[in-house]
Amino acid sequence: MSPTVRPVVFSGAVAVLCAVAVTLAVVAASRPTVVVAAPTALPPSTATFTPGVFASGDATVSKRPDLAFLSVGVDSLKPTAAAAQIDLASKAAKLIAKAKSLGIADKDINTSGYSVNPNYNGSTSTIDGYRASEQISFKWHNVDTVGAALDAMVQQGGATNVNVGFGLANPKVAQAEARALAIGDAKSKAQAMADAAGVKLGQLMRVTDLSYGGPVNYNSYSLEAKAGAAPTQIPVGQLDVSVTVEVDFAIA
């Protein structure tokens, strides 16, 4: 090969190599990035995940309340805050004395609210006095005589702003009954899903109670002292105690 031809061939080869390198770089840049992670690098929730059958269950049982919560208030409107407080203290003492005469123990009496605020004349910003209010809560252990107790507190005790709630003295008994039924419901659902999927239920791995709160029903009543008025009727009814659970079964 003549000396004049050799540089031309060499230059062409370099050009071809550069073109190939550019082409490979473009192809590599256009391909998606693939990341391969070892099992130990997976998130803990994925690395330790165990296949299973998960189901939730719920149940409700109805119980007649055996405890009443009475919330009754007294208030006073006087020209000064001090006078309103003094008058309110007298009214509260009268109400508490009446409650104790009905058989309510000291441990079942507590103040749930107390306030002293300016009282404005209509929609204007003129203060025409001060209103003092106190809300007192009582536990009443005979739900069949709630109406008579409220009548006595209103008519002889001077109570206003009356609210009544019903509950269970020991709600855990009803909750345990409902929980057992809820777990049975969850197991039935888990078995049905396992049968549909063609697998067998294994060991029960976890049971979680998703319930919260307790059963209490509240009603409000506006009671006034009236001579010869019919006794106040407070229907007791029943309380629904509901429980929701979640169960996790391994696959056998």
Image (spheres, rainbow, N blue to C red):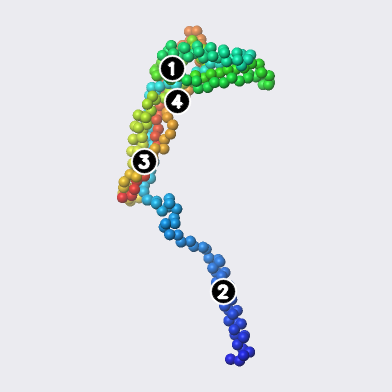
Q: Nearer the viewer, mark 1 or mark 4?
A: 1
Asked whether disc 1 touches disc 3, contact meaning CB atoms under 8 Å apart, the reply is no
Secondary element at tag 2? helix
C-alpha separation, residue under disc 4 versus residue under disc 2: 80 Å
The residue under the point 56% across, 70% down is: 25
Can residue 224 be seen here? The reply is no
Q: Position of residue 134 (x, y in %)?
A: 53, 18
Asked whether disc 4 touches disc 3, contact meaning CB atoms under 8 Å apart, the reply is no
C-alpha separation, residue under disc 1 versus residue under disc 3: 41 Å
Mark toward the start of the polypeptide (1 vs 4): 1
* Tag 3 residue: 207
* Tag 2 residue: 21
For label 1, the crowd category at 10 Å Cα-Cα, with few meaning under 14, some 14 to 19 and many 20 or more, is few
Mark toward the start of the polypeptide (4 vs 2): 2
Mark toward the start of the polypeptide (2 vs 3): 2
Q: Is residue 77 left or right of residue 190?
A: right
The residue under the point 59% across, 84% down is: 10
Asked whether disc 1 touches disc 4, contact meaning CB atoms under 8 Å apart, the reply is no
Task: For the N terminus, give its image quadrant.
Answer: bottom right
Q: Nearer the viewer, residue 92 or 198?
A: 92
* Tag 1 residue: 106
Can residue 41 be seen here? The reply is yes
Q: Is residue 162 left or right of residue 8?
A: left
Secondary element at tag 3? strand
Q: Position of residue 125 (x, y in %)?
A: 68, 21
Secondary element at tag 4? strand
* Tag 4 residue: 217
- Disc 3 residue type? Val
